[in-house]
Amino acid sequence: MLVLTRKPGEQIVIAGNITISIVSVGPGRVKIGIDAPSHVTIDRQEIHAKKAHEEATSVNIADLSALIAGESETMTPPAPQTLHNRIKAHRDAHRVAPPAVDKPR
C-alpha cells in the first residue's frame, strides 16, 4: 500500500486521468474529491462489497433455463472479485522468498 501525506487543496494523480483532491480535513474525517472519466466506477468500500456480493449471488437467466431444461448439471457462480481479493492475489503471485541464510555453528 502506498501511503501519501497531502494537505487540503493538494492532489494525487492516478494513471494520468484520475485526480484525487483533499477538500478538507477535520477531526476523524477527511473529505476528498475524485475527478475521473465517466467509465470509471467509484464506490465507497461498503457499497462495492454489497455490489460484489449481489453479483456473485445473482442467477444468470440462460444458466437457469439450461438447468431447468436439464442441459446443465451444475451452476457455479463466479468468485467475487473484491479489491481486497485482487490485491491479495497480486501479492501472492509476486511474493519473493527470503534468501536462505546459513546459521553459524
Image (cartoon, helix red, strand yellow):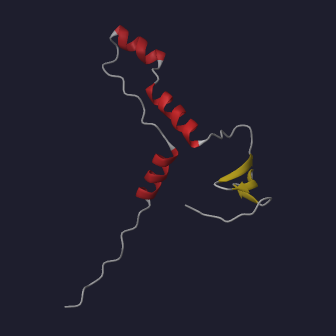
Rendering coords of residue 5 (x, y %): 67, 65
* In-front residue for pair 34/66: 34
Instruction: Give the farthest residue toward the top.
Output: 69
Quarter of the rendering occupied by the C terminus: bottom left
Query: Residue at the spot x=76%, y=54% of the render?
Result: 24
Q: Nearer the viewer, residue 24 or 62?
A: 24
- Tell how many labels: 0
Instruction: State which quadrant residue 91 falls in.
Output: bottom left
* Image position of 24 with respect to 47: above or below: below
The furthest residue to the right: 9
Most distant residue in the bottom direction: 105
On the image, the x and y values in percent for residue 74 come to 32, 22
Question: Is 86 located above or below residue 50 in the figure?
Answer: below
Q: Looking at the image, which residue is at 74% across and 45% down?
A: 36
Residue 98 position in % (x across, y down): 36, 73
- Comparing 61 with 66, the one in front is 61
Extreme-front residue of the structure: 27
Residue at screen point 47% across, 20% down: 60
Where's the N terminus, which quadrant? bottom right
Q: Residue at x 74, y 37 (%)?
A: 38
In which quadrant of the rendered view does residue 73 lie? top left
Q: Is residue 83 above or below residue 91?
A: above
Nearer the observer, 4 or 90: 4
Q: Position of residue 9 (x, y in %)?
A: 80, 59
Is residue 33 left or right of 51 when viewed as pictured? right
